[in-house]
Structure formats: C-alpha cells, structure tokens
Image (tube, helix red, strand yellow):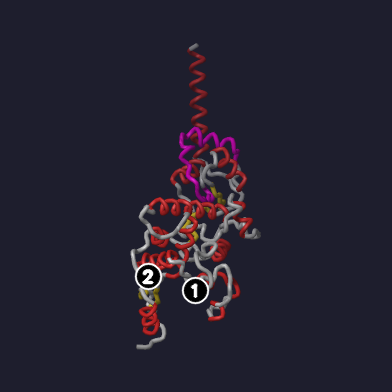
C-alpha cells in the first residue's frame, strides 16, 4: 500500500511539474498576433476553442483544462484581446482575467436620427456590419420589435464593444438602454403632471421634438412646457424640425414657406397633436423635460440666435420677439 501511495504521489508531482512547465512555455501561433473577441456569456470551453480557431496551435482540451485547473475560469472577462507572439498559457489566462482587452467605442449623439445612427455604426472600427443590407423594418424584426418604428428607440450614449462584435449587438444595447430610460422617466411622471401624454411612446415623441428644438439645456423644460400647453388647447405645435423630418431626403437645408404648407403626417403646422413617431433620439435631459415640463403660461418661443430662447404668452409678445431677434427690427 505504501509503495502504491508513493507511486501515486510521484505521478501527481510529475503531472504538476508537466503542467507547470507547459503553462510557462510560449504558445505556438499561426501568425505574429492573434485577436479574439469574447462576448459576454461565452463559456470557458468555447473560449479555449475560439483561441485555437483563431490561430493558437494547441489542444483546445488542454487550454480548457488549464482554465479550469487554475480556478480562474469563471473570472475570464468579455472583451477583445490580442495575443502576441511569445505569450504563454499563463499570460493568456492572466490577460483575460485582468480584462486587458482592446475595446473600441462608438458615440451616438443626442438628436441624431436612426439613419444617422446606422451610418455611424457602419463606419465604426472593428464592428461587424451584420445589418448593413437590412431595411429599418428588418432591423427592428431582428431586435424582436417588428411593429415598432426605429426612430427614437435607441438611447444616445458612448458604447464600448469588443472588436469583432456586431452592429446588431450595439443596437440591442442601445435599445435596451432607451427602454430603461423611458420607463424610468415615465415612472417619475407624477399624477399632477398636466401635460396630455397618454403613454411612454407619446412622451418619447415629445422628448424628441424638445431635443431638436433646444440649443440650451436649461431651456428644455420651458420648451416642453410650451408644447404641453399647445397640446392641451389643441393648438398646432408648429415646430420646424417635424416638418423637416417629414420631408426626408428632399430637404436641402432651406426650409421654405411652401414646405410649411405641404401636408405630411409630420407637418405640425397643418396638423394638431403629436406626429406619428419620434423624429430623433432624445437624450436623458430631453426625456426628463418631457416628463417634468416647466409650469408656464407661454405658448410661443423664438431663438435669440445664441442657443437660448425667448418665451411669450401672447402672440403680440411673440411677434415683438421675432422682430427683435429674427428680423432684427426694434
């Protein structure tokens, strides 16, 4: 029995020694540098296979068993990693556990349209364009929202991603973020809120208009208050950004009187109430302004030309402000 135990101990020590030697040896690689993007939820077994498929000349079973034997397999972080020549199994695991990853970012700006959003994703470094050939409706179907218009449904923010991630993955994150911000904002809407909004979607539409109409952050609640007042008395919103949105690619940067007189679902000079969908991606400040508009009697506003606005309760006051700030008349 003693001899057997001795042999077993020697075998264990030999195995441990072999493992110690192996994890310190440079991995053979097909190429000088190998990149691998590890998505959240990828199992250690799949990660080991991923490195081998990417160009590491090793047994995926050995890599996987090393991850398990180390006790750190569950600590591997999602990210985009580059393995350089000379790396060992030990340094490979340490890199993934430490999260020493190569991330890229894509910035989505408040007030962008979904079309502008998609163009930015198409140009993002290292982002796989899986939706490039899909229509807007097909993109929404991929996100599980086939009956939802995409405009305004994505939260503008800076999104980091692992190189090799898909544009659809970023869209999913941005959509979930907007749903959360929208739900949070709607929850903050008190019973005393007099703005005639019947759903989170209507709040999102109003927020998108506030976003496009505002040059100064501090003015957002007041502008939201003006539009709420107009909705309450069934006065047309009369907001240029909705008209421009309704024109689509036909808009050349010059909004004419004839455009204001051309009926479209988004012409808020000719139609009362909210347009049928958001016209852009509103940020958090615009969402909060829509849910907490300023208490005001104002029904009009005009830009001073410096980003701020002048608010008026009567048409006569508004006309004087227009003459002063737009027509430069005393």
The label on residue 206 is none
Q: Is residue 124 visible?
A: no
1 vs 2, front mark: 1
Give, as a single range, the part of the protein colored magenta.
Answer: 58-86
Image location of residue 8, percent across then percent down: 51, 20
Q: Residue at the bottom extreme?
A: 329
Of 308 and 119, nearer the camera is 308
Q: Position of residue 206 (x, y in %)?
A: 46, 63
Give the vertical position of 9 relative to 50 (above or below).
Answer: above
Q: Is residue 287 left or right of residue 268?
A: left
User: Is 84 part of what is drawn in magenta?
Assistant: yes
Left or right: where 9 falls relative to 135: left
Number of other residues with Cα within 10 Å of mark 1, as a class: few under 14, some 14 to 19, many 20 or more? some
Circle nearer the N terminus (1, 2): 2
Q: Is residue 142 above or below residue 220?
A: above
- The residue carrying mark 2 is 216
Question: Can you tell which quarter of the image residue 115 is in?
Answer: bottom right
Query: Is residue 65 one of those drawn in magenta?
Result: yes
Residue at 47% x, 44% y: name it: 77
**Which mark, by number, is residue 240?**
1
């Amino acid at each position: 029995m003693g001899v057997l135990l001795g042999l077993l101990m020697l075998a264990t020590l030999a195995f441990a020694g072999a493992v110690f030697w192996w994890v310190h040896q440079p991995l053979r690689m097909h190429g000088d540098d190998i990149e691998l993007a590890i998505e959240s939820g990828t199992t250690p077994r799949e990660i080991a296979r991923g490195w081998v498929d990417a160009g590491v000349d090793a047994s995926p079973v050995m890599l996987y068993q090393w991850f398990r034997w180390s006790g750190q397999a569950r600590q591997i972080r999602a990210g985009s990693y580059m393995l350089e020549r000379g790396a060992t199994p030990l340094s490979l695991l340490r890199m993934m556990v430490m999260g020493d990853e190569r991330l890229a970012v894509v910035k989505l700006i408040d007030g962008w349209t979904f079309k502008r959003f998609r163009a930015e994703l198409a140009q993002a470094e290292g982002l796989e364009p899986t939706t490039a050939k899909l229509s807007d409706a097909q993109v929404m179907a991929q996100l599980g929202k086939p009956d939802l218009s995409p405009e305004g449904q994505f939260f503008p923010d800076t999104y980091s991603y692992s190189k090799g991630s898909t544009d659809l993955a970023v869209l999913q994150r941005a959509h979930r973020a907007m749903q959360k911000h929208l739900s949070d904002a709607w929850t903050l809407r008190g019973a005393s809120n007099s703005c005639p909004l019947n759903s989170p979607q209507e709040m999102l539409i109003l927020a998108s208009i506030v976003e496009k109409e505002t040059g100064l952050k501090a003015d957002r609640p007041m502008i939201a208050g003006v539009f709420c007042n107009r909705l309450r008395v069934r006065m047309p919103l009369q907001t240029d950004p909705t008209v421009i949105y309704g024109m689509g690619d036909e808009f050349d940067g010059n909004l004419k009187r004839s455009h204001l007189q051309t009926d479209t679902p988004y012409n808020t000079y000719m139609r009362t109430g909210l347009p049928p969908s958001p016209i852009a991606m509103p940020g958090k400040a615009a969402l909060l302004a829509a849910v907490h508009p300023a208490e005001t009697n104002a029904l009009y506003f005009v830009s001073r030309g410096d980003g701020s606005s002048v608010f008026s309760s009567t048409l006569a006051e508004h006309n004087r402000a227009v003459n002063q700030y737009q027509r430069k008349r005393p």
